[in-house]
Image (spheres, rainbow, N blue to C red):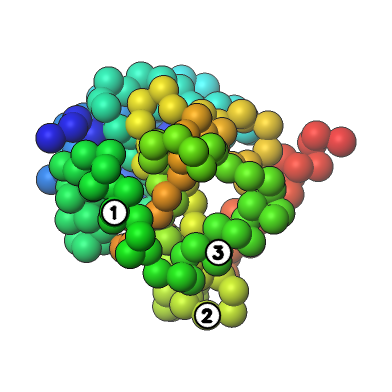
């Protein structure tokens, strides 16, 4: 089976990091964490769970550290996560299954992707432009993401499946590090996995406001 690397960038994620890394321990061949000089126990807990931790500064454009983590990986495929996300059991099984497939088998598998996910990608590409090259073999995958908000995972209202490109072949995708909500640039075709990536996004209204303040402050700093 192909080797899978998990890549994260962190900063003061002590309350999330154990849940995140525990969800991938059975599928990851290596875990790379680039930590932006956390002042809590994030780095120590990541090391306890077997991650290779590299401590650096904490740039406002946090995709810079995500890309650093990606660059440090050695696997055939990369699963990039945020610390407040975790892989569901069904998604973990699906990832193992897809990693065992040939390119031709992946082509066949993608024919079974639900229409909801395909429609979501069409909406994204209408907004952002075409992603990847549809004539090439599959090199990256969107994951359907379920966002936790004030007591429940949201499944309606246009916020699901919230597709995010998170699994890709080594050297076939990168982050431009320009915008906080940017897409990966992918060299190859982009498909979907079917099972959910769980996002512990806003368990309290305080965290919701704090996160959005961080985003808006960074955006304002660009003008």
Q: Residues within 10 Å of mark 2 (few under 14, many from 20)?
A: few
Looking at the rendered structure, the secondary structure element under dot 1 is helix
Q: Left or right of 106: which side holds 97? A: left
Q: Residues within 10 Å of mark 3 (few under 14, many from 20)?
A: some
Which residue is nearer to you in this view: 184 or 86? Answer: 184
| Numbered disc in front, either 2 or 3 | 3
- Which of disc 1 and disc 2 is earlier in sequence? 1
C-alpha distance separating marks 2 and 1: 29 Å
x%, y% of residue 145? Answer: 43, 61
Q: Are marks 2 and 1 in contact (CB under 8 Å)?
A: no
Say which mark, if any, is on residue 120. Answer: 3
**Residue at 46% across / 70% down in the picture?**
115
Residue farthest toward the right in the current orientation of the protein: 223
Which residue is nearer to you in this view: 158 or 213? Answer: 158
**Residue at 50% across / 63% down in the picture?**
118
The quadrant in which the C terminus is found is top right
Per the image, the residue denoted by label 1 is: 108
Q: Residues within 10 Å of mark 1 (few under 14, many from 20)?
A: few
Q: In the picture shown, does residue 194 fall above or below 214?
A: below
Q: Can the viewer see residue 220? A: yes
**Residue at 41% across / 23% down in the picture?**
171
Q: Are marks 1 and 3 in contact (CB under 8 Å)?
A: no
x%, y% of residue 111? Answer: 35, 60
Q: Left or right of 5: which side holds 29? A: left
Q: In the picture shown, does residue 142 fall above or below 68?
A: below
Q: Quadrant of residue 140?
A: top left
Looking at the rendered structure, the secondary structure element under dot 3 is helix
C-alpha distance separating marks 1 and 3: 20 Å
Q: Quadrant of residue 210?
A: bottom right
C-alpha distance separating marks 2 and 3: 13 Å
């Amino acid at each position: 089976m192909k080797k899978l690397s998990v890549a994260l960038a962190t900063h003061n994620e002590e309350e999330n990091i154990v849940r995140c890394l525990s969800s991938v321990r059975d599928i990851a061949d290596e875990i790379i964490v680039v930590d932006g000089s956390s002042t809590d126990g994030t780095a120590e807990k990541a090391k306890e769970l077997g991650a290779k931790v590299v401590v650096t500064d904490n740039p406002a454009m946090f995709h810079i550290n995500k890309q650093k983590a990606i660059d440090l990986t050695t696997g055939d495929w990369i699963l990039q996560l945020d610390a407040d996300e975790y892989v569901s059991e069904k998604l973990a099984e699906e990832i193992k299954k897809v990693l065992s497939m040939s390119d031709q088998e992946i082509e066949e598998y993608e024919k079974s992707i639900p229409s909801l996910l395909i429609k979501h990608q069409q909406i994204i590409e209408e907004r952002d432009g075409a992603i990847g090259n549809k004539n090439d073999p599959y090199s990256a995958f969107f994951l359907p993401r379920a966002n936790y908000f004030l007591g429940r995972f949201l499944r309606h209202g246009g916020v699901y499946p919230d597709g995010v490109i998170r699994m890709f072949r080594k050297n076939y995708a990168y982050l431009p590090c320009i915008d906080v909500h940017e897409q990966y640039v992918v060299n190859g075709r982009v498909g979907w996995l079917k099972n959910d990536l769980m996002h512990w996004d806003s368990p309290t209204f305080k965290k919701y406001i704090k996160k959005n303040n961080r985003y808006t402050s960074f955006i304002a700093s660009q003008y």
